[in-house]
Amino acid sequence: MASGMPKMMSRVLVGLYTTDEGSLTAAELVRRLMVSPASVSKAITYLESQGLVRRERDERRRERYVVGEDVWYQAMIASARSLTQVVEVSRQGVGVLGPGTPAATRLENAARFLDFVQESTIRAAEQARAVLHTNPEAAPDDTAAQP
């Protein structure tokens, strides 16, 4: 929520992210979060549009909502790419206001700043994923310890 994501969407994302399986059905989310099915549906639609959650069918043909292992990478990339439109509109504004005017200079500075932040964020996210990603360790086999 601190990053600007609405409360229910944050709760659903955390609910999915903190399960060992990384997935739950709508009914499981409703029970786990004690919210309405409509709230879960709306949150999933939003999270799916942001590329943070995907839908899969399980063996019983139930729809499961899955959070990927690289959800934070995807979130950073989506956030960075969302700046593209702001940069483009700012640069168009420079042309409308006339280069060299104080307002156009502010827009050009904003565009340059956001463009730099966007490129840096994407580069940092890609480097972090390549360097820091770890695979979960295999769970110990309980039967191997038994005589």
Image (cartoon, grey):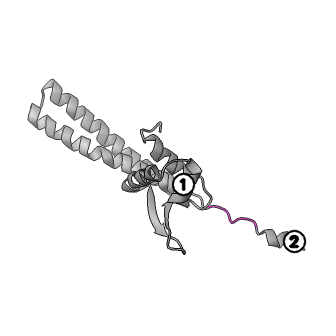
Q: Which mark is residue 146?
A: 2
Q: Is residue 58 left or right of residue 139?
A: left
Where does the image place residue 17, in percent across and percent down from the top left?
Answer: 55, 53
Q: Is residue 82 left or right of residue 9?
A: left
Between 55 and 105, the residue placed more toward the observer is 55
Answer whether residue 139 is magenta in the image.
yes
Q: Which residues are magenta?
A: 136-140
**How dense is the environment of label 1, judged by Cα within 10 Å: few (below 14), some, or many (20 and up)?**
many
| Circle 2: element type | loop
Residue wearing tag 1: 29
Judge whether 83 appears above or below 67 on screen. Answer: above
Nearest to N terminus: mark 2 or mark 1: 1
Where does the image place residue 35, in percent across and percent down from the top left?
Answer: 51, 47
Q: Residue at x 40, y 51 (%)?
A: 42
Q: Quadrant of the C terminus?
A: bottom right
Amino acid type, callout 1: Leu
Where does the image place residue 21, in percent across and percent down from the top left?
Answer: 60, 62
